[in-house]
Image: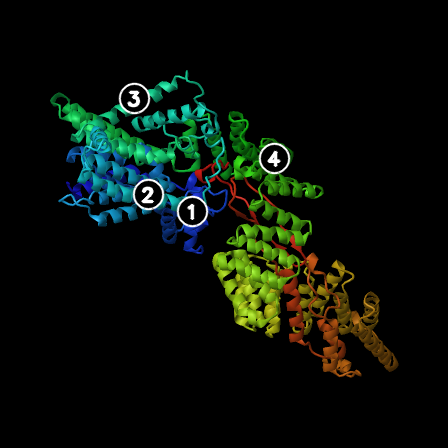
Amino acid sequence: MAVVSWKEILLLTGLVVGCYWNSLSCGFVFDDVSAILDNKDLRPSTPVRNLFLNDFWGTPMAEERSHKSYRPLTVLTFRLNYLVSELVAAFYHLLNVVLHAVVCVLFLRVCRLFLDKTSSLVAALLFAVHPIHTEAVTGVVGRAELLSSIFLLAAFLAYTKSTSADHSIVWAPIALTVVLVAAATLCKEQGITVIGICCVHEVFVAQGFTLPMLLDTLRRVLQGKDGFPYALLQTLLKLIVLVISTLLLVIVRVQVIQSQLPVFTRFDNPAAVSPTPTRQLTFNYLLPVNAWLLLNPSELCCDWTMGTIPLVESLLDLRNLATLVFYTFLGLLAYHSLRYRHSSARTVIMALSLIVLPFIPASNLFFPVGFVVAERVLYVPSMGFCVLVAHGFKIVSHKGPLKKISWLIIGVLLTTHAVKTFKRNWDWESEYTLFTSALKVNKNNAKLWNNVGHALENQNNYAKALQYFLQATRVQPDDIGAHMNVGRTYKNLNKSKEAEDAYLVAKSLMPQVIPGKKYATRVAPNHLNVYINLANLIRANESRLEEADQLYRQAISMRPDFKQAYISRGELLLKMNKLTEARDAYLRALELDRTNADLWYNLAIVNIEMKDPSEALKNFNHALELNPRHKLALFNSALLMQESGEPKFWPEANRRFLTYVEEEPEDANGYFNLGMLAMDANENAAAERWMRKAIGLQAGFRSALFNLALLYSQSKREIDALPALDELLRHHPEHIKGLILKGDILMNHKKDTRGAKACFERIVRMDPTNVQGKHNLCVVYFEERDLPRAAHCLEETLAMAPHEEYVRRHLSIVRNKMAAMSAAGQPLASGGGAAVSAEEEEKPERVEEGPEEEAAEVEEEGRGADAVGKGNGEEKNVRKSSAESLGGVGVDQSESLDSSQSDERSSDRLYQGQLKEMTCSSDFLKAGGYLHRPGLKITLHTTSAPGFCSAASSNLY
């Protein structure tokens, strides 16, 4: 066997790079969206064992909606790609190009077994540039084809070494073959067909049998004239080992899919649900269609489902002639290769085995698959085609007059194919370019119109997208997905009535329930999303919540394992304040999928609504065990720990907030809460740093500005607090606590009575019932020595808060002062309300109560005297500050600040986040919205994912 030289390797690699280098600029398109972007199995946070429990698209194999495509080794390479470059598409495409080059080299090595050096190189060169491979190489999900082919060819090469020079069996290569076959099958299902190729090689090439020889030997054995030849016995033994290995692999594969085939609809493969003879005629006609794509790859299309190829419904259909010609040609080749022993016959039989056997699983002849034609499944069969072309070239080129012409033809063929491949790669640059190129080939496929609409929708071009979706409904009026797309687009265009009408049309097209027949087997799982989408639309109307709930329950009755219905219904029940039922809905969803971090997060939100913080924290922790970088669970669990008031939770809360800001470095709320934790721990420098970071990210951040001012005041840096308060009041002029704190600082530290008076007067103008603001204004009047006005002001305050003893005592102090001054013949009001001298300031100290005692009483009684409800977003007043001047005392800073700080947190710290969607159908599920409770902004995870029609979802629109 001639080895492959370095020059040939470099030639093949250079040709592959030349044809496919532009694929590096392509993005993730078509099936890549489901297999890469939406597949959680690629993320490092997902346990590696999940790769062996889920299908190619990340759906658990046990679920009925699973596509049952079990390719864990391929997904493992995607995961390695993610570790290196996350979601940078160029690296995924680069690895595909490298793998295609490896396949080309291995294929050349295989060709050397039954072709000469020149013709085997021609076969490998043609394989390297054939345009039919663009879907397998340029489409990232085509890697399943590439990896499976590598192991398939390696298994075949290993098996060819299973016979020694003395014709005895060498078992090590056979064992290696079985291992490589298993690996090929774990990359893609068709890998198992290499066993058949090995059997053909063993019988007709290695042992040199022909079909007449086998029949004659069998006849003689049955007649008792002769026994089995030793060579034949050896062959049978090897074949038995291969067959048993194959059966074991098949049994394991059946166990993995739990003896269930995926659910396909007539939209995926119309012939599969057609009656006899339409089904048989159509499936047989697809064979010459695939052969024609190999012969003439001029019009390639990424999707051949639905109405692309009309059904062959009659024996009189002229397309049956193509089927007849195909079978005639195939029969002649088989007859030639099975009857004779010469090298040409062996080459042809191996070429036919490479064409036929790997194609059988996708042929629809033995069991239906989820497509009509798929170019990527021709990747391995094209090897046999290239062998036939190269063999024909060998025969023709050995005839003198045709030698130059044959070389010219091969040169033109390689050049045109290379150019076509290079140009075809550009079609895979984006979804829009891919699907518009497909529409040039086929305008009868509603899925293509839908997917162009999706591409436009992703560009927010809803009006133009609607035109394509409507065209899809005209091409295929009974396409449920197309009507769902129309409804969603109308919703995006704020045309709710038209959206509802479109969803109702889609709903009317759903199969009706037939007693005694399992509903789930008759409908694509994602079509049930019409109930979810319609419910999500009408629940915006508060009067139709029960109607929406009925739709959710209808979906659940049709499919009890419909996880999304439970999720959406849980959110609706929460909105309806049916908390127990909402919790039960999420618990049911968790029974179906306990590995979904978003579900645990949603359940925690329900626990918060049910005022069960310990259970909420437990469920937040479940979410974080499954996804340690779950942003909302990190934030809200940390906030729950912080609000618990238990210092033992603070270090973990701090760690989670730090992780959160790593994930969301532009979210000011994370830094603000880090600052609040630092304030709790009396780490003032850190608190100041975090607060300033929050303010830098969000100008006018109310809570951060106010708490920064509180921090300065607590740290005896009252003057530094004034700029923060000025900025706060510039953005939020109605901030009453800010005005009170500013007035306090101006009064006690700046001695600016007029400034303080302006702050308190502003409070009273905004809220005449604010006791603290009114009281502190009375204090200003007292400081200005306008005793009659102070007394009148305190009387009004006492009328507003008759149970506040400190107001009553201060009024008594003022009245006593007025009586004393009157008795002494002093004026009761200073001129113009100006500030008095220092000597006059000393006089109020001579009151009956001691100064410190009075201060403590005033501050203690002042707490909570005029708290503003949390629900309206205001805060409690910080302090009555200058009131202590009635007793001639200072301000108890620390105690006031502690009270204020707590109040500010309870009202301004919000549970935060965005609606996050779990992958489901390509039809948007815009469920819910923000659900509020006092002091919290709670966000639920709901499902929503725009998707393209893909093999992963069968009929995802």
Closer to the eye: label 1 or 2: 2
Asked whether 256 or 559 is in front, the reply is 256
Q: Nearer the viewer, mark 4 or mark 1?
A: 4
The answer to whether any part of residue 881 appears in the image is yes
Q: Please give the label number shown on residue 137.
A: none
Decide: marks 4, 2 in contact (CB < 8 A)? no
Q: Is residue 914 found left or right of 345 in the rendered image?
A: right
Mark 4 and mark 2: Cα distance apart in space: 40 Å
In space, the residues marked 3 and 4 are separated at their CA atoms by 47 Å
Report the quarter where the N terminus lies: top left
On the image, numbered disc 3 is attached to which residue? 328
What distance separates the C-alpha of mark 4 from that of mark 1?
A: 30 Å
Provide the residue designation for mark 2. Answer: 246
Q: Which tag, 4 or 2, sits closer to the chain's start?
A: 2
Left or right of 167? Residue 313 is right
| Tag 3 and tag 4, C-beta contact below 8 Å | no
- Label 3 vs 4, first from the N-terminus: 3
Q: Pointer 4: what residue?
A: 515
Q: Amino acid at mark 1?
A: Val
| SS assignment at label 3 | helix
**Residue 154, located in which quarter of the rendered image?**
top left
- Residue 696 location, x and y as percent? 53, 59
Q: Which residue is mark 1?
A: 256
Look at label 4 and name its amino acid. Pro
List x then y, in percent, for residue 471. 52, 27
